Amino acid sequence: MLKNLIAAAIIIAAPVLQAQVRVVESSPQGLGSGVAQPGLPASAESDVYSQIRALQEEVAILRGLLEEQNHQLKQLKQLQLDNYMDLDRRISGGASAAATGHDELSKPIKSSASESNLALPDTASEADLYKAAYDLLNQKDFDGAVAAFKDHLNRFPSGNFASNSHYWLGKVAMLKKDYTQARTWFTELISNFPNAPKVPDAQLDLGKVYFLTGEKAKAKSLLTEVATGGSDAARLAQKFLTDNF
């Protein structure tokens, strides 16, 4: 009878014991068990990919900004070139009038009463000095422009705008009919800055100086050389040759 009771108790308790065993087996593992470790590499890899994507997006944004700035710089350069060409055409028109007998250049040149105010500090950049000189030239303050361009050359004799300063100094000398000084400025530009963008223009105006001083053979030779080029000065040289030879 006792054995039967024990057997019945075991049969009744068996499901409870199995449930306890399953609960124990399904309980969380300790930190040292290694169960959670297989998920770490995947998470770390995901973080790396996220960082790469973020860097790629940042590079794309920076590239876009750089392209936009380059475009704006090209527009500014073109605007500056247009201003140069406009002033060059107006000044060249005056020089051509003098060559054909008109006295447009005999009008009084505006004197500069503010030359002392032109002096910029020693810390001024080359671009600031050149811009100040060019602004005076654009305002037809020729004496002030001459002083400012010379100041620019004294401070930056081999600067990025040195060839341009030589050119405009030669132009102003032509306006004043100081052809000897004009020849000097143009010749120095051509000799010292042979690769400068203003060389064809300087050659064109040097040819005009030769013409105006009676050296027509030299003028024709130099202007013919300029006319064969591909610059804007080539068209002006061809026109001058057609009108005067």
Image (cartoon, rainbow, N blue to C red):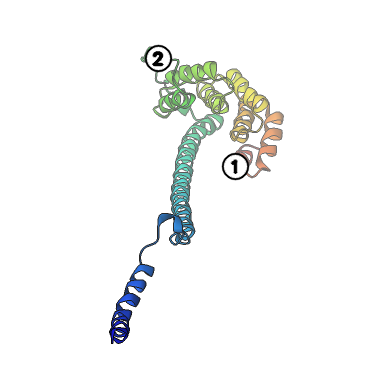
- Residue in the foreground of this view, choosing between 20 and 146: 20
Q: Residue at x 40, y 17 (%)?
A: 118
| Residue 179: x %, y % from top left | 58, 21
- Residue in the foreground of this view, choosing between 31 and 237: 31
Amino acid beneath label 2: Glu
Q: Is residue 195 above or below residue 154?
A: below
Which of the labelled discs sits on residue 115, or is there none?
A: 2
Residue that sits furthest to the top in the current view: 116
Q: Is residue 142 above or below residue 232?
A: above
Crowd class of label 2 (few under 14; some 14 to 19; many from 20; radius 10 Å): some
Asked which quadrant contains residue 229, the reply is top right
Crowd class of label 1 (few under 14; some 14 to 19; many from 20; radius 10 Å): some
Which of the labelled discs sits on residue 90, or is there none?
A: none
- Residue in the foreground of this view, choosing between 70 and 92: 70
Amino acid beneath label 1: Lys
Q: Quadrant of the C terminus?
A: top right
Closer to viewer: mark 1 or mark 2: 2
> Disc 1 or 2, which lies upstream in sequence?
2
Asked which quadrant contains residue 180, the reply is top right
| Residue 10: x %, y % from top left | 32, 81
Secondary element under disc 2, as helix, strand or loop, is helix
- Left or right for 132, reference 168: left
Measure the alpha-carbon separation of dots 1 and 2: 37 Å
- Residue in the foreground of this view, choosing between 215 and 138: 138
Asked which quadrant contains residue 195, the reply is top right
| Residue 237: x %, y % from top left | 62, 39
Q: Residue at x 59, y 39 (%)?
A: 233
- Left or right for 143, reference 10: right
* Residue hosting label 1: 239
State whether residue 23 appears in this view.
yes
Secondary element under disc 1, as helix, strand or loop, is helix
- Left or right for 89, reference 189: left
